[in-house]
Image (cartoon, rainbow, N blue to C red):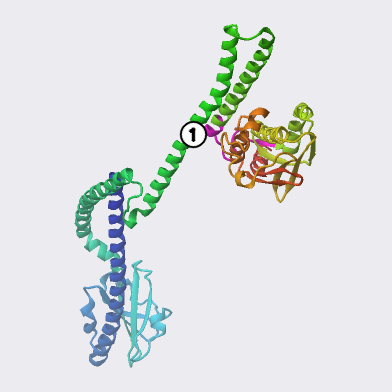
Amino acid sequence: MGRKLGFQFVIVALVAFLLTFGLLVNIFNSTMIFGAKKDLERETQMISDLYEKSGDISVLEVYTDGPIRAALLDKDGIVLYETDEELQNEIGRDFGEYPEIANADIQTVSSAERISDITGLKTYYCAMKLENGQIVRLATDINPAAMIVRQSALTMVIAFVILLFVAMLSAYLISKSTMKWFASKLELLEKDPYAQLPKELESVAETVKEQHIKRKENEKARREFTANVSHELKTPLTSISGYAEMIENGMAREEDVKQFAKNIHEEAGRMITLIGDIIKLTELDETRQDAGGESFELLDLSDLVKEVTASLEINAKQKNVTVRFDGELCIMSGDRSQLYELAYNLCDNAIRYNKEGGFVTVSVRRSDGKAILKVVDTGIGIPEEYRERIFERFFRVDKSHSRKSGGTGLGLAIVKHIALCHDAEITVKDGIERGTEIKVVFPVNTERFKTEAKEEN
C-alpha cells in the first residue's frame, strides 16, 4: 500500500508540473502575442511617418534582417519593394484584396491575422496608407509558444528530472510516515474498537466498530446455536438411552417393550428431523444467494404452493384441519426447492398449531408487480410481543406444545433465510378468527430471463 501511495504521489506531482508548465506557456503565449501585435502597430506608424517625410526607400531596409519584414505597395496594392530576400519574387504581385491592404487608411493602422500562404506560419500584418496613396506594410510571424518550448527544452528536461527525484523522495518519506501513523491507529482500533480517532479516520473507525459488533453478534449467535443444538439433541438422546437401558437390563415389562420401542422410534425420528433442519440452515448460511442466482428459474408460485397443500392433506386430516387453497397464475423467478420448503414450513406450522376442526387458508396473488403468498390459520395465535422473535432459531412461544406437536423450532428460521435469499418481506399479524396471518411478498424478477430468451432467439 505504501508503494502504491508513493506512486500515486509521483503521478500527481508530474501531472501538476505538466499542467503548471502548460498554463505558463499559455500565459506567455498570450502575453507575447499581444505585445508583438502592439509593437508591430507602433512600428508601422513610425516607419510610415519616416518614409513619408524622407521619401527614401532605404528607411525600410532596417527590417532586412530580423523578425519583422517590410513591404511598399502602390495605391492598387501592387508590391513595389520587399525587404525579405526570400520574398523578392513577390514584387509585382497584387495584394489589393488582402484585408490589411483593402482597409488601409491615412493615419490609421489596419491589421489582419492569418496563415501566410508563403511561409505557412501564423502571421500578423499591419498596413498604413501614405498621403501619396502608397501603402507601407509590416509583417511578423506570431508563433511564440513553439519558440518558448524550443528555447526552454533543456531547462524543462533538467526541471523534470529534479522534480521526479524530489517527488519520489517526498513520496517515499510521506507514504512511510503515513503508513506508520495509519498502522498505529489501526492497532489502537484492534485493541479498543471504540477508541477516539482523528476525523480523517472516522469512517474507518465506524466500519471497524460495525465489523466488531457484527463479529460479536455472530460469535454470540454461534454459541447460542451450539448450546441450543446440544440441548435439543440431548433431550431425545436421553429418552432413547433411558428406554434402551431399561430394555437391556430387563427392567421393562414385556407389555411395555412395544411402547418403549415406539417412543425410541419417535425420538429418533425427531432427531433426524432436527438434524435435517440444521443441515438446511447451514446450507442456507453458506450459500446465501442474491435474487437471480444461478439456481433461480422461472416458475408459477401458485402451482408450487398448490403442490405443497396437496402433500399436507394427510397431516391436515390427522389434525382434523381443513386446508383451503386459492391462487392465480403468478410467474416469478426463484429457487424451486427453497420456495417449496418455505411454503411447506408455513403451511405445516399452520396445521400443526391449529385447533381441532380449524381452518388454514392459503392464497397466492400478484399485485403491483409482486408475488404475495399468504397463510392464515385459526390456531393458537402468536402474542404480539413474540412476533419479531418467532424467526429466531429454536425460539418457541409455547415450548411444551411445540415439543408435543413435533416441531424442531427451526422451521420459521429456515423460512426467514429463504425469504432473504429471494429479497422477500415477511409480515406477521392476527388472523381473522384469532389465529395468525403470515404474508410473504416476493419481487417477481423475471427481466433476466426475458433478456436471456431474446439473446437465444
Above or below 197: residue 254:
above
Q: Is residue 291 visible?
A: no
Looking at the picture, does residue 147 appear above or below residue 170? below
Range of residues picked out in magenta: 283-298
Res. 413 visible in picture: yes
Which residue is drawn at the image coordinates 49% and 34% (left, top)?
224
Q: Where does residue 243 sit, x and y in percent of width and height?
A: 60, 14
**Is 135 in the magenta?**
no
Task: Indicate whether 56 appears above or below 265.
Answer: below
* Horizontal side of residue 267 vs 39, given as left or right: right
Q: Quadrant of the N terminus?
A: top left
Q: Magenta segment, principal secondary structure?
A: loop
Residue at the spot x=25%, y=65% of the render?
A: 148
Q: As drawn, is 211 to the left or to the right of 38?
A: right
Which percent across, then down, holds residue 450? Answer: 67, 42
- Which quadrant, please, contains the C terminus? top right
Q: Report the amino acid beneath label 1.
A: Glu
Q: Nearer the viewer, residue 97 or 112?
A: 112
**Residue at horizontal 35%, vertical 70%?**
122
Where residue 129 appears, as percent x and y from the top left, is: 34, 88
Circle 1 crowding by C-alpha within 10 Å: few under 14, some 14–19, many from 20: some
Q: Position of residue 113 (x, y in %)?
A: 37, 75
The residue tagged 1 is 224
Quadrant of the rendered image containing residue 233:
top right
The image quadrant that residue 214 belongs to is top left
Q: Look at the numbered disc 1 and give the secondary structure of its residue.
A: helix
355 relative to 201, above or below: above
Identify the residue at image location x=49%, y=30%.
Answer: 227
